[in-house]
Image: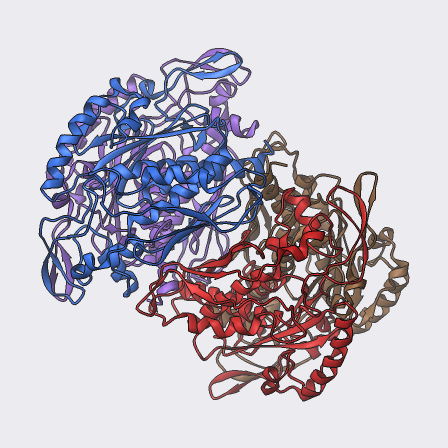
Chain colours: A brown, B red, C purple, D blue
Amino acid sequence: MSFNTFGQLFRVTTWGESHGPAIGAVVDGCPPGIELSEADIQPYLDKRRPGQSRFTTQRQEPDQVRILSGIYEGKTTGTPISLMIENTDQRSKDYANITARYRPGHADVAYDMKYGHRDPRGGGRSSARETAMRVAAGAIARKVLGPDVVIRGAMVAMGAHKIDRTRWDWGQVDENPFFCPDALTATEWEAELDAIRKAGSSIGAVLEVVVEGVKPGLGAPLYSKLDADIAAALMSINAVKAVEIGDGFDAAALRGEENADEMRMKEGKVEFLSNHAGGILGGIATGQPIIARFAVKPTSSILIPKRSISADGEEVEVMTKGRHDPCVGIRAVPVGEAMLACVLTDHLLRHRGQTGR
Amino acid sequence: MSFNTFGQLFRVTTWGESHGPAIGAVVDGCPPGIELSEADIQPYLDKRRPGQSRFTTQRQEPDQVRILSGIYEGKTTGTPISLMIENTDQRSKDYANITARYRPGHADVAYDMKYGHRDPRGGGRSSARETAMRVAAGAIARKVLGPDVVIRGAMVAMGAHKIDRTRWDWGQVDENPFFCPDALTATEWEAELDAIRKAGSSIGAVLEVVVEGVKPGLGAPLYSKLDADIAAALMSINAVKAVEIGDGFDAAALRGEENADEMRMKEGKVEFLSNHAGGILGGIATGQPIIARFAVKPTSSILIPKRSISADGEEVEVMTKGRHDPCVGIRAVPVGEAMLACVLTDHLLRHRGQTGR
Amino acid sequence: MSFNTFGQLFRVTTWGESHGPAIGAVVDGCPPGIELSEADIQPYLDKRRPGQSRFTTQRQEPDQVRILSGIYEGKTTGTPISLMIENTDQRSKDYANITARYRPGHADVAYDMKYGHRDPRGGGRSSARETAMRVAAGAIARKVLGPDVVIRGAMVAMGAHKIDRTRWDWGQVDENPFFCPDALTATEWEAELDAIRKAGSSIGAVLEVVVEGVKPGLGAPLYSKLDADIAAALMSINAVKAVEIGDGFDAAALRGEENADEMRMKEGKVEFLSNHAGGILGGIATGQPIIARFAVKPTSSILIPKRSISADGEEVEVMTKGRHDPCVGIRAVPVGEAMLACVLTDHLLRHRGQTGR
Amino acid sequence: MSFNTFGQLFRVTTWGESHGPAIGAVVDGCPPGIELSEADIQPYLDKRRPGQSRFTTQRQEPDQVRILSGIYEGKTTGTPISLMIENTDQRSKDYANITARYRPGHADVAYDMKYGHRDPRGGGRSSARETAMRVAAGAIARKVLGPDVVIRGAMVAMGAHKIDRTRWDWGQVDENPFFCPDALTATEWEAELDAIRKAGSSIGAVLEVVVEGVKPGLGAPLYSKLDADIAAALMSINAVKAVEIGDGFDAAALRGEENADEMRMKEGKVEFLSNHAGGILGGIATGQPIIARFAVKPTSSILIPKRSISADGEEVEVMTKGRHDPCVGIRAVPVGEAMLACVLTDHLLRHRGQTGR
């Protein structure tokens, strides 16, 4: 992955700042002959779109994506697909008072350390707004993977409050504003997040993405391990601080005999009796569901004043009045799904290239 | 990262199987004029080398590295540095009875799914033996980074048993066979691991790498985030299932005001009052210590029989009699350090290229 | 170079079809803090723009470039610069009768062989229209290189008719419609090309780009040789069939003692007494002017009927009635200059990264 | 292509200096299950090997290649293939008197400009010795391409003396020391080169590589054009100054109707009636023979004294007494073939990845 591009054969390059005229992406390497229109992409963008509940930023962006190239008569041509979303509701004035003051926990100070010159409006390039293009690219990736590959994400913890996994029901995920698979917990989160929002604070979250139907053999040793690429893809999302595959950190606590996913034969195929590995061994997919979890820190844009400095080196207090997400992790669910879709598509093309299968 | 190469300007390509004639690496892009000899690399290899205590595999490999190119009169020339270690103690017969039987939890079944043809001796390419070359490359990276960048690793949990961080003492790390910074815990681990080893079992671990002295500004948006590259680098190590930066998963449980690392000025420079971020904001180094943790699962090569299948699809029981690590996480400490060194060097060269600083 | 991206640290990704809604490019890796606006780019686009004389296609495109990201308060921020030109004059109906018939010598048959599905309007992705974005990217590259690096191109042969190099005058290049440095030859070409144009035919050309002020040491062994990257960059331009550096093919006819560029010292620096090498030795710039020449074949879109086949495998005759360039090589001059600018910028950043100079 | 690696899915990384202990390559991405042993590679190395006639350097290198990884039971495993050749006859003393004096026309001065520190023995990294590893990698690439793809090279001009193409006979190529397909010209070259050799001089050459049996559709727009990648690959060979595809520079002299390769149908397939294009249109293979030519300059290591400078900036005269090739172009024939094999293999894997065909 290099600067603003990820993938090797299925390559996604994104561009754009939060308050510039538009954001966009170029998806290069998409196979030809795939039916694709804006209608395939829009539903995923709508899922990520801000302003859908009181728990996400009230910025109103219709986020209508346009395809500018790479499609002819409704099908991909194999040439680059250019995607663009115009920014419409960029109330930069909301940010006027913070341009010169770094928000503690936010990337703006680091951008200045690196570049010395930065678009401060709404976080500029470091804004979570960029993730809209990941979601759009992910929608194209899903078309390449086909309907047999099912990618679903969920929020599994808000703050320290985890879901009860015994109540997991994928059917619930679209029934609450949290993509929560546990209806009861969702209700409790609602009250908790209301309190956090009213306090001008924010809270972190843990998200989980599960992928079923992955072809065994995808992935590759050693530095292109499927899990290494997934880790990079998820860690590249704004505010993500941790990634795990399968049992993840809990695997460290296991004995060898507990962690081993035993195998039997079933109808001529390998059947695993458990899935501690999260569907990946040695960086290669085994055909079991791929399970990835990631942690999103709380938004740094809060109403509670914190000590900071200005770009001029003055000691100041900072609080952010813009419209923000009290739990930015919520909107990371479709983003995480999209990243998995992109990584798997890239690996599919590379695997097919190397092995001819 | 692509197949067996990682890095973009500081590029490391490794090759070799556990029981082939040799293993090696090509380090391309190393700056010219740096003093380098085998003596700079060997100490790090010795730290990773098996057979040093009863807690690591009893395979005896002197692991003497040879530099075959890229050096003239004791200094790097800017051309590729070829490194090679000959394999000497490859008792393949130990593995004779497992060639056709997949170890549950091991990559061998996945390699067969991908390639259909595989060197089974000692894990072949998927063996942890490959990590010796990462350590060698990391030693070169340290020379590029210079003495002001201090990279240190430690084991912070064996199984569910964590160290007491209040007793953290870097001076202890080389005084026990676990790279444990907490002398008391190290003693307790000794007894525990003896029991595990005698039971023919194995156990996972959590490792932590801390890097001090990193130049603020290293790293890059958005898909080359420093933390994204670190996550990929650590996840690409054998048996690693999870990675976190700074507070990692714990950050998900925090409120925005708790997670924010406040800033003051000190002697004309930014001083952070805490380090929840682990030294990285928006994918860019802030100058604070970089803190990365990763989880290693227990070795799958154990003496306890588990249900599995053979390459022919026969249902079998598998136990592994070869010489193995009861806690393979121990030897992952120098490997993790090396991966951080390589990632930081790559970012240093790219940063210098883009910004001229 | 991969699919639609070239460069490693200074990366240019282009997208768009001749008759789609727009064409564009994303320039990633541009250093921060460089003053840049559309006004820096437009003059180069105007130079390449069609419809400026009777010797280039009569398609009227204002080719107004817009910068959509990566700039704040008139300066680059180090984040991706998105460029877009809307297509306005896409008379697709001109092409209606050729959609299903392959033009002999044109890429359309090859695209169908590869992708099976293709945008046929005006050549789609294979149209020379894409080169506008190369020119735009090249304008940015020139800003990075700074004013001391002077990149100039010229047409040195039209068909078999070469210029007289003893009359070379850079001042003439903008005084005739051919970018010809030899005023007398330009006059003769005018008459010749009029005749070709009226005959509904087309003609090839040879172009030369000279770069002065290149920092010695840019370039790199062995597969990133400066001349290897230049060769790829020029050969990737539409209709280019040959590339040479310095004496090029003529070097094959020389004796060792004739080809050797002797050296003396002048004011403490190396002075070369000749420049057979074209400024590059072993893939590395010597500080002498870099000289690259490339050949452009005649446009395949001509009014003279030729035997061909249709997409359905029917044997047909094809003649192309659209507006085309009788000598497409003319407009390749600014494109060649731009490619050199991009390659040199990429090497500048990589060199700076590796050597710190 | 980056530094010392070329290719994207079929990746070749080379290392080693002329007078170091060994040279080598790592071939990564080779498909699994291909029968491969040293015996598949050695014949190509023998063809390139020095000391086979009085027209190539008298350095005696057995050039015995060893495969150190990536093969199990005689077949590739899909993991990196490490190749090594030990240097045995490195009479460095021959070069003792030139270490500090730059040979005019040689890369050594440029390496010092870039790196400031360089292995001067026998050209170090810039020595043509490196091309042995390209030939070895090319032999592996041929195995991937399979027997239907026939890659053959020939020398078509020595100095200004071209072959008579009407006498072209592939059967002659291995019957003379020049890989010359025209027996009569070969005899004349013999006398001419004897004279050059005795005069302590050297001479350039033009080589041609023809590839038959290439799958239509290989290649890709726009910066991965098959011809762009071929141009880079050939230009990256030592001493190459020019590359052309099909009619190359001669295409510039043609009219559109002359250059157009007309098409008819033959047995349900496209048949081209000529091959001005050299088998590539729009960067994509058409199924016709791919024809590439390249020019090699005369060796700069000659016995004739030339004015130069020393590394200390002293003005000196230089003549080179080492064993050198009077026409280094001869040995470039197998190298050119190998580069074509590698480029085509890389494109085959990428094409298969993207299109599934």
Q: Which of the pair A126/A207 is nearer the observer? A: A207
Which quadrant is the N terminus of chain B positioned in? bottom right
Q: Is residue C243 shown to the viewer in this render?
A: no
Q: Which of the pair A231/C187 is nearer the observer? A: A231
Q: Which of the pair C140/B75 is nearer the observer? A: B75
Query: Quick check: D183 left or right of B75?
Result: left
Q: Is residue C189 shown to the viewer in this render?
A: yes
Residue B244 percent location from the top left of the image: 66, 69
Q: Quadrant location of residue C257?
A: top left
On screen, residue B309 above or below B53: above
On screen, residue B312 above or below B334: above
Query: Quick check: C234 left or right of A211?
Result: left
Query: Quick check: D232 left or right of D67?
Result: left
Q: Residue at 52% across / 35% down in the picture? A: C20
Q: Which of the pair B126/B206 is nearer the observer? A: B126
Question: How many numbered markers are drawn?
Answer: 0
Residue D356 percent location from the top left of the image: 60, 34
On screen, residue D48 above or below B353: above
Which quadrant is the C terminus of chain B positioned in? bottom left
Residue A66 percent location from the top left of the image: 61, 43
Residue B61 percent location from the top left of the image: 55, 66
On screen, residue A87 above or below B212: above
Q: Residue at 87% across / 59% down in the picture? A: A182
